[in-house]
Amino acid sequence: TDRSIIRLSANCPKLQSFYIPHQRDITGDSIIRLAERCPNLQDLNLCSNHKITDTDIIKLSEKCPTLKSLNISGIDITDIAIINIAQGCPNLKHLSVFLCSHITDESAISLAENCPDLQSLNIGHTKITDVGIIKLAAKCPNLQSITLEDCDITDTSVVRLAEGCPDLVKLQLGFCRN
């Protein structure tokens, strides 16, 4: 519950990794408290916590600049949240926004411009197109894993990833529309 997360953050300020996926009762209030009291947080999984909002993610980005891994898959967020994460967490290496259906090329472009050390990116079931993938391929040469399932991309994206990301070891393309 929120109460336990608030208690945890008050008593464990050195916390660096926290996984709390699929919780119906967790709200942004406790996550913001966690971010405020645990400034060394590097790894956070909030997957499918449906009470988390854009505003909560924006505050998280302001309080946790050392974040390296973030899973916010299945949360109803928009580009504004991802743009703030990209700008506020430049050391981000792993991001999952799988099933975040409001995420577009704006997010991909911001990640490319602000997070050049990205190694894994799960953007399956978003509205990202060739435009965003081309930018990521050009600016994120350390990309090793990318999931593009059910994205509106063409062969152009695959070719650009092959040319721009020589360390790529995992590429998931299922259900792509083009």
Image: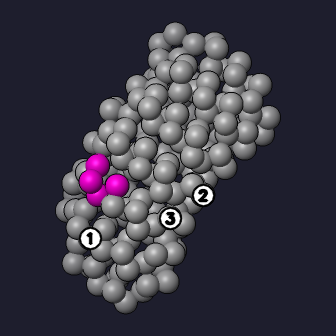
Q: Position of residue 123 (x, y in %)?
A: 49, 35
Locate the N terminus by quadrant: bottom left
Q: Nearer the viewer, residue 25 or 89?
A: 89
Mark 3 Cα within 10 Å, few/some/many (few <14, many 20+)?
many
Residue at which label 2 appears: 91
Name above or below for residue 118 compared with residue 106. Answer: below
* Residue at mark 2 to residue at mark 1: CA–CA distance: 24 Å
Looking at the rendered structure, the secondary structure element under dot 3 is loop
Give the residue type at disc 2: Asn
Q: Earlier in the sequence, mark 1 or mark 3?
A: 1
Type of secondary structure dominating the magenta stretch? helix
Mark 2 Cα within 10 Å, few/some/many (few <14, many 20+)?
some
Q: Say whether residue 146 is left or right of residue 31.
A: right
Camera sees residue 169: no
What is the span of residues highlighted in magenta in the rendered image? Answer: 54-58
Q: Position of residue 8 (x, y in %)?
A: 35, 82
Q: Is residue 57 magenta?
A: yes
* Residue at mark 3 to residue at mark 2: CA–CA distance: 8 Å
Give the residue type at disc 3: Pro
Tell me whether the residue at label 1 lies in contact with that at label 3, contact meaning CB atoms closer than 8 angstroms.
no
Looking at the rendered structure, the secondary structure element under dot 2 is loop
* Residue at mark 1 to residue at mark 3: CA–CA distance: 18 Å
Tell me whether the residue at label 3 lies in contact with that at label 2, contact meaning CB atoms closer than 8 angstroms.
yes
Q: Is residue 38 magenta?
A: no
Q: Nearer the viewer, residue 106 or 8?
A: 106
Front label number (1 vs 3): 3
Color scheme of the displayed model: one colour
Give the residue type at disc 1: Ser
Q: Earlier in the sequence, mark 3 or mark 2?
A: 3
Residue at which label 1 appears: 30
Mark carried by residue 65: 3
Furthest residue in direction right, as rendered: 166
